[in-house]
Image: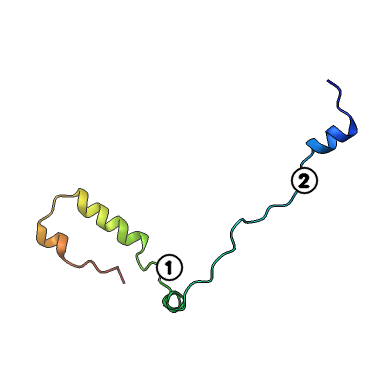
């Protein structure tokens, strides 16, 4: 099937990427909460590994509930 210049032009699609929705500005109270930086999670990898090791190893319930301090 042979296509003419008009058919080829109609089949060619060009454009640029654009978002459909405009981003909303967060409410003032959300902006105030972000100032405290809640996105920075204060739990370290070492703390997570310690908890996982505690779950795997058999210990008394008192040891599991005791606070674990990070090494100095």
State left or right for residue 69 relative to residue 18: left
State left or right for residue 4 relative to residue 71: right
Classify 26 as above or below 49. below
Sequence-first tag of 1 and 2: 2
Q: Which mark is residue 39?
A: 1
Classify 72 as above or below 1. below
Where is residue 41 drawn, in percent x and y? 38, 66
Secondary structure beneath dot 1 equals loop
Quadrant housing the C terminus = bottom left
Is 5 in front, or is 26? Answer: 5
Secondary structure beneath dot 2 equals loop
Q: How dense is the environment of label 2, judged by Cα within 10 Å: few (below 14), some, or many (20 and up)?
A: few
Where is residue 46 drawn, in percent x and y? 33, 60
State left or right for residue 39 relative to residue 63: right
Is 30 in front, or is 59? Answer: 30
Residue drawn at x 58%, y 59% as measured from the top left: 21
Q: Check if mark 1's residue and mark 2's residue have beta carbons within 8 Å.
A: no
Residue marked by disc 2: 14
Q: How dense is the environment of label 1, judged by Cα within 10 Å: few (below 14), some, or many (20 and up)?
A: few
Where is residue 60 drawn, in percent x and y? 10, 56
Residue drawn at x 13%, y 54% as measured from the top left: 59
Where is residue 12 drawn, in percent x and y? 79, 38
Is 9 in front, or is 53? Answer: 9
Quadrant housing the N terminus = top right
Residue drawn at x 29%, y 68% as measured from the top left: 70
Is 3 in front, or is 52? Answer: 3
Locate residue 20: give its quadrant.
bottom right
Tag nearer the camera, 1 or 2: 2
Locate residue 50: give its quadrant.
bottom left
Q: How many numbered markers are drawn? A: 2
The CA span between labels 1 and 2 is: 39 Å
Residue drawn at x 31%, y 61% as measured from the top left: 47
């Amino acid at each position: 099937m042979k296509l003419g210049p008009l058919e080829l032009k109609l089949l060619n699609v060009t454009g640029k990427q654009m978002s459909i929705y405009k981003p909303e500005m967060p409410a003032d109270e959300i902006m105030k909460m972000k100032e405290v930086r809640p996105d920075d999670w204060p739990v370290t990898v070492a703390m997570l590994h310690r908890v996982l090791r505690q779950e795997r190893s058999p210990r008394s319930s008192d040891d599991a509930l005791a606070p674990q301090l990070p090494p100095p």
